[in-house]
Amino acid sequence: MGSKGDTTAPPELELEERFAAPPRQGEAAGELTLCFTGDNLLGSRMTALIAKHGEAWPYQLVAEPLRAADLAFGNLECPITDYAHSTPGKPLATVRAGKNFIFKAPPQVSSRILADTGYDIVSLANNHAMDYCAEGLLDTLAELDAAKLAHAGAGRDAGQAAQGVVLESGGWRVGYLAYTLIVPPSSRAGKDSAGVNTLAKQFQPALAAAIGELRQRADIVVVSLHWGQEGSRHPAAYQREIAHRTIEAGADIVAGHHPHCLQGVELCQGGVIAYSLGNFLFTGKSSRIESFILRVKIDGAAADAGEQRRCHISRVELLPVWVRGGRPEPSQDSALLRSISDVCASVGTRVVQDNGLLVVEADAAQ
């Protein structure tokens, strides 16, 4: 795919080409830039805002860095469907009490906005993908497929939900796996039933096996994990254990989300862990929500077939963002930069300011 530039029209690639690319045979490739964002909610109050301001409005202020990335990833925190019946796994009484939330976004408009903004792949492995039952999830899959937007972490059955996705850009093959550790009743994919790809709150051999299998088809492996405690700025012990073991098993990047706030970024054995990317496009009680775009740059050194890790992460950048009134906007506000620095410091990582960005120091241990 390369640098995307103008993305007003989705790439004209067959889905099979994007989802099952053959492995690169160790040849040198150019520098690659991967972007990651947290939760994207195009439903709830955002639906009315889009109707009022237009389809370009939600991501207008951050579309440039997303489009400039070779591949951009985000968590899609709602089904895209008109289906009327919500899941029995979130009873109406708990929704009315504010203990559960149910979201959906309008079809066609939502998938088009994501693709036009510059997203290449979204995770569906979260606790809202099944808010409108299997029918809503199947509608979502169809909408994303029609927009030529790749997706991971959910499917028509457990096999499809667990399938790794491989995208190609600039000679690199980037593989994505997505899991949710937050699993409402009736959400898990079954042998013959639609749902999300799940993981227990401990590292499992099946995850190591999935990483190993995907490594055979990809030069770079990304694992997306929906996990953690809502409202907590500190990763739980199980998050840190799973993240470290995921990198040890051969993943290059762990991209976490769910807590609705930021948690720190950590370097680990040549890989990158973002424990929580926070909210990105999200209407909520707060008028300002802290966020950032994680940007990982990978250099073009030729791979050594004898090494487990076949890429070299040369730079990790955080583009600070305020989410105001639901939509993200880049900011150099000193309070925001200080807050992001603090959550990184809490996991032993130093960041330095560089021309409006926060850059993770290569020797990041405190």
Image: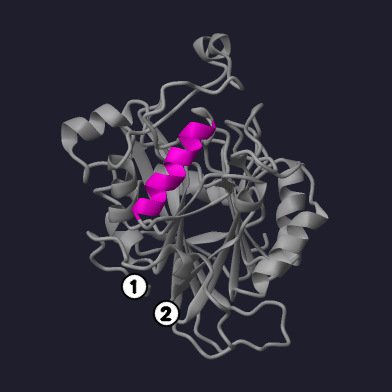
Residue at image point 66% right, 89% down: 304
Span shown in magenta: 134-147
Of residue 194 and residue 41, the one placed in the foreground of this image is 194
The local secondary structure at tag 2 comes to loop
Expressed as whole percent of the image width and height from the top left, the position of residue 248 reads 75, 65
Of residue 282 and residue 85, the one placed in the foreground of this image is 85
Crowdedness near tag 1: few (<14), some (14–19) or many (≥20) residues, C-alpha within 10 Å: some
Residue at image point 64% right, 33% down: 229
Instruction: Give the numbered dot on residue 340.
Output: none
Task: Examine the image and state in which quarter residue 244 appears.
Answer: bottom right
**Going from the N terminus, do you reach mark 1 or mark 2 first?**
1
Q: As displayed, is residue 101 above or below residue 270?
A: above
Q: Are marks 1 and 2 in contact (CB under 8 Å)?
A: yes
Which residue lies under the disc numbered 2? Answer: 170
Q: Is residue 144 magenta?
A: yes
Residue 231 appears in the picture as rendered: yes
**Total residue callouts:** 2
